[in-house]
Image (cartoon, helix red, strand yellow):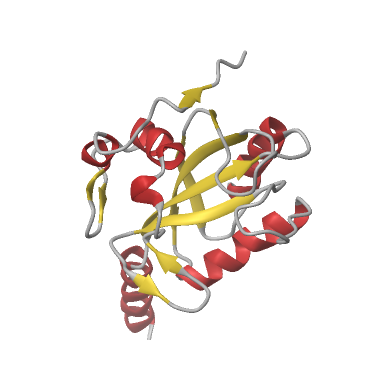
Amino acid sequence: MRGHGGVHTLKRASQLWLMLEEVFIGLGSNLQDPIQQIQTAFEELRQIPQTDEMARSSLYCSVPIGPPNQPDYINAVAHLMTHLEPLALLDALQTIEAAHHRVRFAHWGPRTLDLDILLFGNRQIHSTRLVVPHPYMHVRSFVLKPLSEIAPNIEVPDQGGVMDLMRKIEIDDVYKLQLP
């Protein structure tokens, strides 16, 4: 019996290893001390079960997309490794957003915290709750600049490499914050 249990445990461990996915999360905030919102969110991402933080970008400032007269955004990208399935990770991200009092009242409107799954391994997901790769990431400098900082060689499925994508768009409207 002991030998059989050892084989079962080894098989289970190898299955878990195979399910480990590389994930990139976009973070954004333009309300209620956005720098602190992002820094706190980085720490909360580290607490997601079965998930490890691999890297985090610097913080970047960008002009808002969407309704006029809203404050500039603070943006960043986190690189995670997770055993969670995409919707379970999305649930964890939405729990973090809710803890930051995220209210969804206007499309592309101001927010305390926005957490988006940009990439989930090489998966392409099209469900009512989640689209991955993020459908606009390849044209958003506030995503590509921080992503290129931590993963300059990453490929966006059906779009190309992050460095090539950055050459196709205006990127001077996003700048890295110089924090102490």
x, y percent for residue 4: 33, 83
Relative image position of residue 126 (x, y in whole percent): 39, 75
Please state the horizontal and vertical placement of residue 88, each as a whole percent of the image: 54, 70
Of residues 94 and 55, the one nearer the viewer is 94
- State left or right for residue 24 relative to residue 100: left
Taking 141 as reference, is 18 above or below it? below
| Image quarter of residue 101 | bottom right
Q: Nearer the viewer, residue 31 or 91?
A: 31
Quadrant where the image shows the N terminus: bottom left
Q: Compared to 37, does 93 lie above or below?
A: below
Image quadrant holding the C terminus, namely top right
How many numbered discs sit on the rendered protein? 0
Viewed as shown, does residue 172 lie left or right of 161?
right
Residue 114 position, x and y percent, is 61, 51
Which residue occupies the foreground of this view, 59 or 159? 159
Corner quadrant of residue 8: bottom left
Looking at the image, residue 170 sits to the left or right of residue 163; the answer is: right
| Residue sitting farthest toward the front | 68
Pick whichever, 78 or 136, lies toward us: 136
Whether residue 95 is situated above or below residue 145 in the rendered picture: below
Q: Residue visible at 48% across and 23% down?
A: 175
Residue occupying the far bottom of the picture: 1
Residue plotted at (50% across, 28% down): 58
Which residue is pictured at 62% across the width and 59% down the height?
A: 107
